[in-house]
Amino acid sequence: MKAFAQTLSNISNKPIQTTLTQHATLLSFGYLWEKIHIDSKLFSQLFILHPLPLLDGLENDKQIAHFARYEVGTEFGVAWLLAHTLSSTFQANTADSNIAQLDKLLNDLDVGFLASESNLAEEELDKLKTFINPSSFALVLGAELAQHPNAKDIAHILGLLSKITNIEIIMPELADSIKPNQSLQAELSVCEQLPESNGNFIYIMPKRSVADIALDSPINSPLLKTPPLFAKALKLQDKTSITLGFESQQILTQCQYDNSLKGTIALLYLPSQSIKQQELNLGYPYKKVEVIL
């Protein structure tokens, strides 16, 4: 994550902050919000983009102006859609030499294709345009973007977007803020295809969640909270132990029904010791899984 933030900072020539400073509006991309992380004093409105439905307690929060989901794995395409949307809303620094290159790529961008493949409707992007307050706006990015296979490309397009506008970037999961340490030229690669997200997926909850949220009791072993549709698809029984297989790993976990969860993605909570041991191998937190009998 630090390398991703450093690339953003070097390209934008701006610091990457860790704290949610006061802004009229925030656009959140790839960051998982929980009730305890929303402070009414920091912003007036929040626009959230994330593959997971809103967690319990956030559905009726008046600070959330709008919430839109995109498909797992399509963050690179979403980054280009955001560049297309935000560049037309903010006044660009016309003295920057990257403007012409970006304008050409955005003019040729197949917005319809990317919107369709990422399942992020063009109407959602139109809502974003009406939501933005260019004079008081920040982009909040989650650590999962840094773990994406196209993390470098995402950093380059968003870093350039920040450089040519007055957009501030905040990454709350960074341990410390990052300042530019060299001048880095953005190398833009257009997103021409996106992965499909067929199958059964889990989301490995961030470390902050294990410490912060109110689980029924402290966990000493992995806990899988399953929405009804996920449990039904895999024929899982409540309060039973199962072994999940993904990539080259296997995890023994306790299955727990959670009717408050929407959608089809289950949430995997790992105890602190388990996270320490495995965090270097986990990577992108969305995992296509199978139950190993």
Image (cartoon, rainbow, N blue to C red):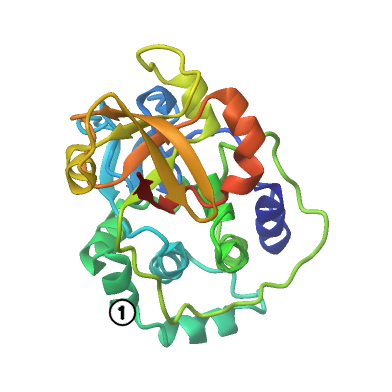
Up-down relation of residue 107 to residue 157 (above or below): below
Please tell me which residue lies in front, 196 or 209: 196
Answer few, some or many: residues within 10 Å of disc 1's Cα (few below 14, many 20 plus, some between 14 and 19). some
- Image position of 60 (left or right of 242): left
- Image position of 278 (left or right of 20): right
Residue 151, quarter of picture: bottom right
Please tell me which residue lies in front, 110 or 41: 110
Up-down relation of residue 109 to residue 259 (above or below): below
Question: At 56% across and 49% down in the image, what residue appears?
Answer: 168
Question: At 53% across and 54% down in the image, what residue appears?
Answer: 145
Visible residue check, residue 26:
no
Q: Where is residue 132 in the image (x, y as percent from the top left)?
A: 36, 53
Report helix, strand or loop for mark 1: helix
Question: In the rendered structure, which amino acid carries the disc numbered 1?
Answer: Phe
Q: Say which quadrant the C terminus sits in.
A: top left
Question: At 45% across and 34% down in the image, what residue appears?
Answer: 252
Q: Where is residue 120 in the image (x, y as percent from the top left)?
A: 28, 63
Please tell me which residue lies in front, 105 or 274: 274
Quickly name the residue at label 1.
113
